[in-house]
Image (cartoon, grey):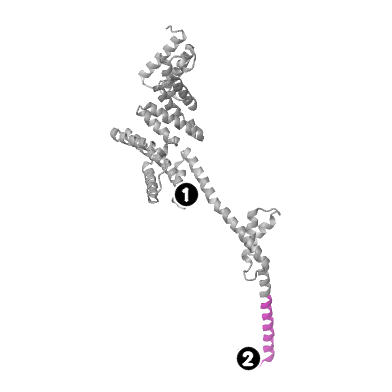
């Protein structure tokens, strides 16, 4: 083929001519593509979106367009003005990185708030999911670990709670750090859970041991400003018939909860047990008031409150003056009748077979009628 082209000059000239035209076309096309490459930014779709926005576009969109332009400019061809602009872009990027650096902390706080809300609502699986995700990012997040342990205790999974608490203790010991009051509080919750479990199983001796260890945990000096720990401590002290200590612990727990705006201040249990302690200490009006608060917090659906209030009003030693009713015996009789009747309705509604309780309530109603008639039967 090469020999045939060499022998025919017209064909040779024609091929040369077409060769020159081909070379010129290649050069022109490369020049056009180069020019297009220089004038067209990399993120063309992003700029198209930005062009549709009004002039006052968001700072985030502006930062994005600046970053794309800075990436397309070659470093070696920069003029002094371009270098100055680049420096400004770098500062903008650095500030945006700082802003992004704050977001993880805010995000973590938001997730912790979500986990606490889930715990209050009894959504323990959600608490576990959120706290485990936080611990994957930061394994020394003690707040997340403690919240997870509390969820496991409330969930009825004491073995998992024990593992979490022991894990915290190991890390703290390794880093030569002290355990927090909240750790001792949750450890007390775990010990109390085990005491209740042993009581149900009839293991009395073991239950006493668990309960005494729980009292020690709640009595730790680091827990003296934790209303939740003082609440459980007061409950256990009342169970042990240490009414003065129990009243002191519960009163302090209530005061701290009110000062901190905690839900514990509106918990019927703390008021009910305060009433029990004050009743045993013969603080009649205080006991009456605490039981009334508990009854109202339970929306008048607290049979134990009705029973205790009726019992209090039935005592001869408790005068109307001691209850803050002045010398009006009829007010005391009305109080006795109201709560005795409410408790009798509860027995009827639940179809209780406690005949002894029914006899006691009927005797109270008879006494209320007698007091209303001025002591006459």
- In the picture, the disc for residue 90 is none
Give residue 212's position: percent from left, percent from top: 33, 35
Residue in view at x 39 percent, y 44 percent: 165
Badge 1 crowding class, 10 Å Cα cut-off, few under 14, some 14 to 19, many 20 or more, is some
Quadrant of the rendered structure where residue 339 is? Answer: top left
- Outermost residue on the top side: it is 376
Residue in view at x 66 percent, y 66 percent: 82
Q: Nearer the viewer, residue 253 or 104?
A: 253
Q: CA distance from mark 2 to mark 1?
A: 80 Å
Q: Nearer the viewer, residue 276 or 368?
A: 276
- In the picture, the disc for residue 134 is 1
Asked if residue 146 is among those painted magenta in the image, a careful observer would answer no
In-image side of 246 versus 203 (left or right): right
Give residue 76's position: percent from left, percent from top: 62, 71
For label 2, the residue is: 4
Using the rendered image of the protein, determine whether residue 234 is visible from the camera's viewpoint: yes
In the image, which residues are magenta?
3-28
Secondary structure under the numbered disc 2 in the rendered image? helix
In this rendering, is residue 308 above or below 174?
Answer: above
Residue in view at x 55 percent, y 51 percent: 102
In-image side of 50 versus 128 (left or right): right
| Sequence order check, earlier mark of 2 and 1 | 2
Give residue 32's position: percent from left, percent from top: 68, 73
- Which one is closest to the eye, mark 2 or mark 1? 1
- Outermost residue on the right side: it is 55
Image quadrant occupied by the N terminus: bottom right
Using the rendered image of the protein, determine whether residue 351 is visible from the camera's viewpoint: no
Image quadrant occupied by the C terminus: top left
Q: Main secondary structure of the magenta part?
A: helix
Secondary structure under the numbered disc 1 in the rendered image? helix
Q: Nearer the viewer, residue 68 or 179?
A: 179
């Amino acid at each position: 083929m090469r020999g045939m082209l060499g022998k025919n000059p017209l064909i040779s000239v024609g091929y040369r001519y077409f060769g020159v035209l081909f070379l010129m076309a290649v050069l022109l096309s490369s020049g056009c593509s180069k020019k297009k490459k220089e004038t067209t930014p990399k993120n063309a779709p992003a700029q198209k979106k930005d062009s549709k926005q009004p002039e006052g576009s968001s700072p985030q969109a502006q930062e994005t367009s600046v970053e794309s332009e800075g990436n397309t400019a070659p470093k070696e061809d920069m003029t002094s003005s371009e270098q100055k602009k680049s420096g400004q872009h770098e500062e903008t990027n650095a500030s945006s990185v700082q802003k992004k650096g704050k977001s993880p902390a805010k995000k973590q706080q938001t997730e912790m708030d979500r986990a606490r809300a889930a715990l209050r609502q009894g959504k323990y699986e959600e608490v576990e999911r959120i706290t485990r995700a936080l611990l994957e990012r930061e394994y020394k997040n003690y707040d997340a670990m403690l919240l997870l342990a509390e969820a496991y205790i409330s969930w009825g999974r004491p073995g998992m709670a024990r593992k979490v608490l022991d894990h915290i203790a190991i890390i703290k010991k390794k880093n030569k750090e002290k355990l927090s009051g909240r750790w001792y509080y949750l450890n007390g919750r775990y010990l109390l859970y085990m005491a209740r479990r042993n009581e149900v199983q009839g293991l009395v001796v073991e239950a006493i041991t668990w309960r005494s260890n729980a009292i020690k945990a709640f009595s730790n000096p680091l827990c003296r400003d934790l209303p939740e720990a003082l609440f459980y401590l007061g409950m256990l002290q009342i169970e042990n018939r240490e009414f003065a200590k129990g009243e002191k612990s519960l009163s302090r727990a209530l005061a701290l909860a009110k000062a901190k705006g905690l839900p514990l201040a509106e918990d019927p249990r703390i008021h009910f047990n305060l009433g029990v302690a004050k009743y045993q200490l013969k603080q009649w009006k205080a006991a009456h008031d605490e039981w009334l608060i508990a009854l109202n917090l339970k929306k008048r659906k607290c049979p134990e409150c009705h029973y205790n209030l009726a019992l209090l009003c039935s005592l001869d030693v408790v005068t109307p003056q001691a209850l803050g009713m002045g010398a009006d015996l009829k007010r005391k009789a009305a109080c006795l009748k109201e709560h005795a009747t409410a408790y009798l309705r509860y027995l009827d509604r639940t179809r209780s077979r406690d005949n002894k309780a029914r006899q006691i309530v009927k005797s109270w109603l008879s006494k209320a009628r007698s007091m209303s008639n001025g002591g006459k039967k």
